[in-house]
Image (spheres, grey):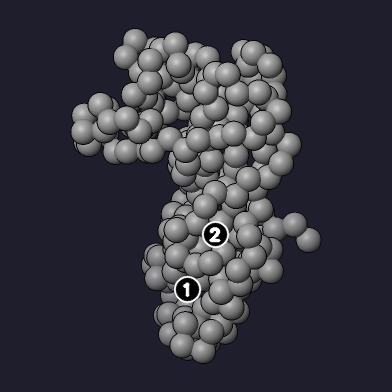
């Protein structure tokens, strides 16, 4: 069975004896689920099992003082790595060079250095994508190819019909986490419900500890400890028609760890 965020929400309501929308607004459940999944995402970031990244060819679009880098169907993204292939390299040669990504506050310190650098400075208010500065000339940018490794922020992923961004085997863990987090959000409960929640909350906590218990390596910790490489996807650039050769790599690419 394919679980969606809507189904996860239904199971949370069922676990809490089906409070109505006046007692537990669905928006509150959504906020709690996002916070929980952000925590799962951080767990993966600090484990040998990194969460999925996507590799896409991109074409920086020149603006007045910077460039715009967009990815198809991704209004926002978290950049992890940016590479370029300068003009003159054959499209059959996998020669990609890393561009150092630096924060905006230190851009002036890196702009004049010999190493190629770039600075992403946030999503655009009226455009999809992010503004980027390069310490390359306009001619160098226009004649080169660029490859971006990125992750999608969880808040962009969690739509009502989407699947949770974690293995389906761990959806019961998410439901338990959601029940515990949302139980305290129920408004104006009856005395009977309060007595039930006081009695049952420790039961839910004990069940969650079977999944997430750092002391005795719960199922989630054992999963995170595995050192399998993360799956990656290759994608055609957002504006592929503008690419001079229309080329896209067909091999997976996993960014260096550490």
Quarter of the image with the C terminus is bottom left
Q: Position of residue 85 (x, y in %)?
A: 55, 27
Q: Position of residue 67 (x, y in %)?
A: 41, 19
Q: Would you name the residue on which mark 2 appears?
A: 50
Mark 1 residue element: helix
The residue located at (38%, 38%) in the rendering is: 100
The residue located at (60%, 68%) in the rendering is: 227
Q: Position of residue 246 (x, y in %)?
A: 69, 19
Upstream in sequence: badge 1 or badge 2: 2
Q: Observer-nearest residue: 93 or 84?
A: 93
Q: Observer-nearest residue: 184 or 173?
A: 173
Q: Would you name the residue on which mark 1 appears?
A: 180
Above-or-below relation of 2 to 58: below
The residue located at (58%, 19%) in the rendering is: 88
Distance CA(mark 1)–CA(mark 2): 26 Å
The residue located at (65%, 19%) in the rendering is: 240
């Amino acid at each position: 069975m394919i679980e969606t965020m809507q189904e996860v929400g239904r199971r949370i309501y069922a676990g809490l004896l089906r409070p109505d929308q006046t007692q537990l607004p669905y928006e509150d459940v959504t906020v709690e689920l996002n916070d929980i999944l952000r925590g799962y995402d951080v767990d993966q970031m600090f484990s040998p099992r990194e969460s999925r990244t996507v590799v896409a060819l991109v074409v920086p679009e020149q603006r007045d003082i910077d460039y715009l880098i967009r990815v198809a169907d991704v209004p926002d993204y978290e950049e992890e790595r940016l590479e370029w292939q300068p003009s003159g390299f054959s499209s059959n040669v996998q020669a990609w060079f890393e561009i150092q990504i630096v924060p905006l506050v230190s851009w002036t310190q890196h702009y004049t250095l010999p190493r190629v650098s770039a600075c992403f400075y946030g999503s655009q208010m009226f455009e999809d994508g992010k503004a980027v500065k390069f310490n390359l000339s306009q001619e160098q940018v226009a004649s080169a190819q660029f490859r971006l490794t990125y992750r999608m922020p969880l808040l962009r992923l969690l739509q009502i019909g989407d699947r949770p961004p974690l293995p389906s085997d761990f959806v019961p863990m998410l439901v338990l986490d959601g029940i515990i987090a949302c139980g305290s959000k129920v408004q104006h409960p009856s005395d009977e419900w309060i007595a039930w929640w006081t009695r049952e909350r420790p039961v839910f906590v004990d069940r969650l500890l079977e999944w997430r218990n750092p002391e005795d390596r719960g199922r989630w910790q054992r999963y995170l400890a595995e050192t399998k490489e993360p799956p990656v996807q290759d994608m055609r650039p957002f504006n592929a028609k503008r690419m001079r050769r229309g080329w896209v790599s067909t091999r997976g690419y996993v960014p260096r760890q550490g």
